[in-house]
Image (cartoon, grey):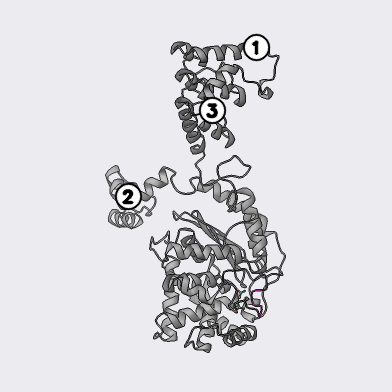
Amino acid sequence: MMENLKKLSRKNANGHAVDTQKLNFEQFKRIISTNIGLIAAAFRHQFIIPEFQDFSKEIEEIYWKCKENDSGTVASYIPQLKRMSPNYWGVSIVTIDGQRYSIGDVNIPFTIQSCSKPLSYAIALDLLGADVVHTYVGQEPSGRNFNELILDHNKKPHNPMINAGAIIICSLLKTMYNPDMSSAEKFDFTLNYFERLAGGQDLGFNNAVFLSERECADRNYALGFYMREHKCFPENSKFRECMDFYFQCCSLEANCEIVSVIAATLANGGICPISEEKVLKPESVRDVLSLMHSCGMYDYSGQFAFKVGLPAKSGVSGGMLVVVPNVMGMCLYSPPLDALGNSCRGVQFCEELVKKFNFHRYDNLRHASNKADPRKHKYETIGLNIVNLLSSAASGDLPGLRRHKLSGVDMKLADYDGRTALHLAAAEGHANCVEFLLKYCNVPVNVKDRWGRTPLEEAVAFGHTDVINLLQLWDEEASRNSKDHSDDGEPLIPEFVAKQDN
Ligand code: GLN
């Protein structure tokens, strides 16, 4: 659409900027025709987060709150990381429909470090299959530091999200998939995969970081040798090349905006929302998200899964890749790290996010709660609830009505004609539903629709004697106001209830 607009603007040459030129209806139609699906969805509020501007405002609020957090220290094991400003703080969001919001230092390049781990794991799954990959690496959280010298009881690395596991994943990619590729070719091949995950955007390579990583890698080499002793590497692995490949993946460089697209591709089952390219298989992405959920935040993974309940992966440079599956991907970037190696502001942001929104994996999406659901249109919930509620009442579906009540639906809701569930149940002669609505849902008996009709008048008009009796009895009792019916376990008309139950 923008291309079309530019073309037209060039042709018109009337001094108007591309996005302020005036179009007639025919031109407008022509210009949007190639993107009609996307534009129609936007105007109909059919994106995954329909009220995206409201949502972005909330994100901005959390952003400023976390900016005040000045705890943590910047990683200092190599000079290139030590130099990063502790003040950098950026947040970028991309939804699975390609809606984007960014705030703060989102264009500062940083090396992705451990955020590369879920990505190389994903590529290995896609190319080699989960069975092969998991003969070399486990799926358990290690309960230890990310670079601890430890293997599981099968003498395999615990999972692909810690250094030992990621080194083995790199060796699998290097040795088991197209082993004839040179190191340079394998690097290009992997970089290309990462870039496709990012919707075709360029990633950089920080050679100084790579050289420093390799220089200061005593622990990673120790891990490598320990694993070689235990035959963790696939046959024919070239040890040094595999280690280099791991350091290269850590030294790939991107910024918040770019990494957020990668996160969104993971949120979208492997299809990049920006380029619409299918980069990974959905089953590979599912496995990646599972392990990010249980192992992505080093030794804080258990607490993070408990408090935040979202798959995430942090890196030593302060980057964090967070996924809300089927909704959106985020990249958070702030260099100061806590004692466990996670970005302080990043972790705080996630905790604040799930306080506001029901994104925690185990948040209930149906029942009323004090958290907002940004997936829903403001009016959609009410509209859908009314339709469902009234259909249950009209068809005499008592279990359905019970379900609505248990889900926190307001049983007094009326449609645009002022018709309530009670009107419909009365008109259709569903006495059990009428009784339920009066007795357990506090629906007012004399509620009027827009023609001024009450449920009793409906029952009379259609000759439903049971319902007439019930409504009259209730009305009398209500006007006497002597009894609290909601606590009264006795049915109003015992014989009637027995009959219905049969
Ligand atoms: N380059 C780092 C290492 O291997 C990556 C680890 C991390 O980000 N925590 O030690």
Q: Give the range drawn in magenta.
A: 145-149
> Where's ligand 1: which quadrant?
bottom right
At 50% from the left and 87% from the top, the residue drawn is 241
Specify whether 433 is left or right of 349.
left
Which one is nearer the viewer's eye here, 425 or 375? 425
Mark sitting earlier along the chain (3/1):
3
Quarter of the picture containing the N terminus is bottom left
Classified by dominant secondary structure, the portion drawn in magenta counts as: loop
Residue corresponding to mark 3: 413
Residue corresponding to mark 1: 479
Picture quadrant where residue 484 is located = top right
Disc 2 within 8 angstroms of ligand 1 (CB):
no
In the rendering, at what x and y percent does residue 96 appear?
46, 55
Comparing labels 2 and 3, the label whose residue is closer to the camera: 3
> Given the image, on which type of amino acid does mark 1 rest?
Ser
Specify whether 201 is left or right of 86.
left
In the rendering, at what x and y percent does residue 401 appear?
53, 30
Specify whether 76 is left or right of 406.
right
Which one is nearer the viewer's eye here, 359 or 461? 461
In whole angstroms, how far apart are the C-alphas of marks 2 and 1?
61 Å
Comparing labels 3 and 1, the label whose residue is closer to the camera: 1
The answer to whether 113 is drawn above or below residue 402 in the figure is below
The answer to the question of whether label 2 and label 1 lie on touching residues, with beta carbons closer than 8 A, is no
Residue corresponding to mark 2: 32
Mark 1: give few (<14), some (14-19) or many (20+) Cα within 10 Å: few
- Label 2: which secondary element: helix
